[in-house]
Image (tube, rainbow, N blue to C red):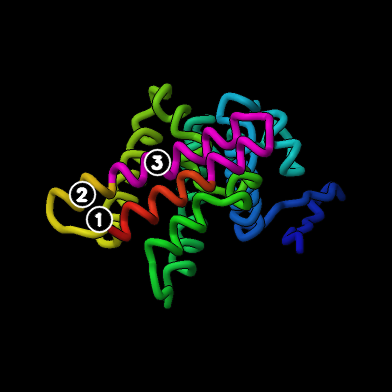
Amino acid sequence: MMMIVIIVNSKGWVIVKITREQVELNRAHVIDTAATLFRERGIDGIGIADLMKAAGMTHGGFYRQFRSKNDLAAQAVAHAVKGTSSEISAVLDGADDPLSALVRFYVSPEHRDAPSSGCSLATLAIDAARSTDPALQALFGDLIGKYIALLTTLVPGDGRVAREEAIATLAEMVGAIILSRAVTDRATSDEILRAVVNDLLTRHAE
């Protein structure tokens, strides 16, 4: 619900002021919209004007909320990562085989077919690699580190062996989603996903 304050001044003019609460709600909505559209189209794939239009707001309001597009991108990615982390936590919670649950959740047709709500690594890692924005690069470095740390606790082995296996597993999972989205033939796309799931689960079962 829109939170506004209507003031009639001494000249009879009506002044509409948006409350601080509404300003924060608007800002959160822009961040949420950007998190979706950046994953769907890439950070350079949509301009500020179109993004604000998609959020139902004016272009002019952007710079009252964010310092730059890079500022919004960093906040949108952080928001997206938080959402994906919550989904992964829910998948792992109570799973009999957490590694299998994570692999099947990540390397899946559902994830492939929903880039706008999926993992940022599989949609925006290239954008981060090309970016000159330290904040965005730091976010992806932290995200990769967290995935590696999580997978290190799930894969067989310990110490350096487990870490190297975790890195290989992450690379295979992310690569599977990227490749499965890149091919136009659905049968080949499905085949990529199945092959990677089978490879990871068979290898880690040994």
Amino acid tagged 3? Glu
Q: Position of 56 compared to 30: left or right?
A: right
Q: Distance between the Cα atoms at labels 1 and 3?
A: 15 Å
Q: Which quadrant, please, contains the C terminus?
A: bottom left
Measuring 40% from the left and 48% from the top, which residue is drawn there? 199
Q: Which residue has dot 3 on it?
A: 172
Q: What residue sits 57% from the left and 24% below the top?
A: 44
Residue closer to the observer: 66 or 44: 44
Q: CA distance from mark 2 to mark 1?
A: 5 Å
How far apart are the alpha carbons under marks 2 and 3?
14 Å
Q: Secondary structure at mark 2?
A: helix
Give the residues in magenta.
167-193
Tell me which numbered mark, 1 or 3, is placed earlier along the sequence. Answer: 1
**Circle 3 Cα neighbour tier, 10 Å, few/some/many (<14 / 14–19 / ≥20):** some
Report if residue 30 is visible in the image.
no
Q: Indicate which disc residue 152 carries.
A: 1
Q: For mark 3, give the secondary structure.
A: helix
Extreme left residue here? 159
In the rendered structure, are the residues bearing label 2 and label 1 in contact, judged by CB atoms less than 8 Å apart?
A: yes
| Quadrant position of residue 54 | top right
Q: Which one is in front, 121 or 21?
A: 121
Question: How far across and how far down the image is residue 88, in percent?
Answer: 46, 61
Q: Of the residues under marks 2 and 3, which one precedes in the sequence?
A: 2
Residue wearing tag 2: 163
